[in-house]
Amino acid sequence: MDRIRAPALSYQRKKQKGMHSPNLSCSYEIKFNKLVIFIMQRKMGKTRRTFLMELARRKGFRVESELSDSVTHIVAENSSHLEVLDWLRGQTVGDSSKFELLDISWFTACMEAGRPVDLEMKYRLTEQDQSPPLNIPESEVPSFIASKVSQYSCERKTTLNNYNKKFTDAFEIMAENYEFKENELFCLEFLRAASVLKFLPFPITRMKDIQGLPCMGDRVRDVIEEIIEEGESSRIKEVLNDERYKSFKQFTSVFGVGVKTSEKWYRAGLRTLEEVKADKTLKLSKMQKAGLLYYEDLVSCVSEAEADAVSLIVKNTVCTFLPDALVTITGGFRRGKKIGHDIDFLITNPGPGEDDELLHKVVDLLKKQGLLLYCDIIESTFVKEQLPSRKVDAMDHFQKCFAIFKLYQSRINNSSYNTSKNFDMAEVKDWKAIRVDLVITPFEQYAYALLGWTGSRQFGRDLRRYATHERKMILDNHALYDRRKRIFLRAGSEEEIFAHLGLDYVEPWERNA
Ligand code: DCT
Ligand code: MG
């Protein structure tokens, strides 16, 4: 028997190679007369449907392009029993109960077997399909109904417990590749899909598991399908082997290097960081020079113990000048992550009056103590009463400092730092370079700044998108503006901001979207 791959996969391969759709005028001998198949285009797309129909005909099945009373088996993909019945109600056929309603997995099994396979329960679309897939942990079942999953991550509670890492890692590689190509739309498509799968309370093992979920476009589904069927994705492998991706990945891992600089270096013929370092004609910014100088330390992750140690230094230094100041760790560490690429701090003064010089004083003292390897202070560009920014990824207007701290091992709790005098200290590097962001915010904007800087990035993007599209409001890291009432909505806490938006409160550790 000519064993074939699952049809979806062959379809993908053809699509990758840019092959044309098969010639439908060919006629094939019908081997299985007892059944007449109709494949629903809904949630499948025309090209895939055409391909599957052709495949089945080639295998000797009778497949109708139009739904008629002669059809016996209806095949649907990513559709529930209820959705198929709804669709059938709109068609001009007699009694719809005469059709066998089947999931695409039945069709796939037939194609693999080269003959019609039994209509086992697992292939049938039944009313029970409205309930979640069988592999969901019992305790999670009541809270999970795919069609109720919001397209906005701010309406989902996403902890760090990711059951679908192999898919979300793949999506993040796809997204990164599109980011390098400055294709924002496709990049966001994969980031949103990754965010939905991070929320799922079970690992997906079959296409049916993503049925009804938002943000599962064709490109995303193709990757999922391949990983389910083959354990890995050929697209991801292609990206990981792509010369441009590999170079951009290296370049953008340097502090101060973004897509624009990477593009410039790549166009200049540079491919690796060694080549960048060796090229004396390149004009590097101060930030990029520091990024290259401390590269090894900066690419190694920051641990929680290191974050605590830096936090102590920052708090002590700030309090020397403003004893009542509030210093808060934000970013991934506030969301409960155990490691990060940097440490983000928000600094605010709840007392009366502001000290515009605070950040400069803090930085000067840290420098004097030999604790700063690099710093770049950006002054505030905030203008009172200006409308929040509509740009989803725009930088905010706070005064801030992008720094590299010199963290001595001796300051880290439980460090394995060896204080023995037996070896020559001059030979040993007893510190680590650590990326730190210090952000100064006026107290009345603190709640908005905290919400924005806690992230995750995707959570923040969706909050802003939700505010714009669902509430006619504009949200950024400084304020929330109600466009209908034409007023700014004040908030003293994150809870109040969620309430203004009409959203249930989401705890920081549930924002890992
Ligand atoms: N953020 C922001 N404006 C910026 C930069 C960041 O509002 N100009 C938000 C988005 C997420 C949060 O601040 C922290 O940013 P990162 O440090 O980049 O992300 P992270 O979640 O802390 O992740 P990591 O662990 O990699 O640092
Ligand atoms: Mg961070």
Image: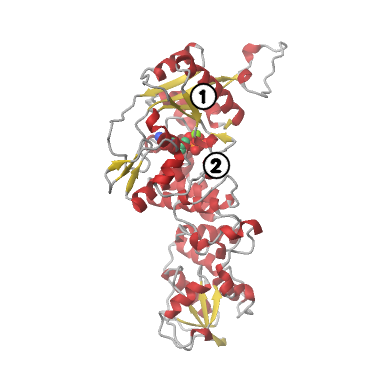
Q: What residue type is labelled 2?
A: Trp
Name which of mark 2 and mark 1 comes first in the sequence: 1
Q: Which residue is at 52% across, 64% downward? A: 211
Q: Mark 2 points at which residue?
A: 509
| Alpha carbons under labels 2 and 1: distance apart | 31 Å
Q: In this view, does 299 lie to the left or right of 280?
A: right
- Amino acid type, label 1: Tyr
Give above or below for 232 relative to 370. Answer: below
Q: Which of marks 2 and 1 is in front?
A: 2
Tag 1 residue: 294
Kindly tell me whether residue 258 is visible in this rendering.
no
Residue 248: x percent and y percent? 45, 39
In the depicted structure, whether residue 501 falls above or below residue 320: below
Q: Which quadrant of the view contains residue 217? A: bottom left
- Mark 1, ligand 1, within 8 Å: the answer is no
Label 1 element class: loop
Is residue 130 visible in this depiction of the protein?
yes
Nearer to me, 448 or 125: 448
Which residue is located at x 44 percent, y 14 percent? 364
Dot 1, how many residues are within 10 Å of its Cα: few (below 14), some (14-19), or many (20+)? some
Q: How many labels does the image show?
A: 2
Q: Which residue is drawn at 52% across and 42% down?
A: 507
Image coordinates for residue 228, horizontal then vertical, percent: 59, 60
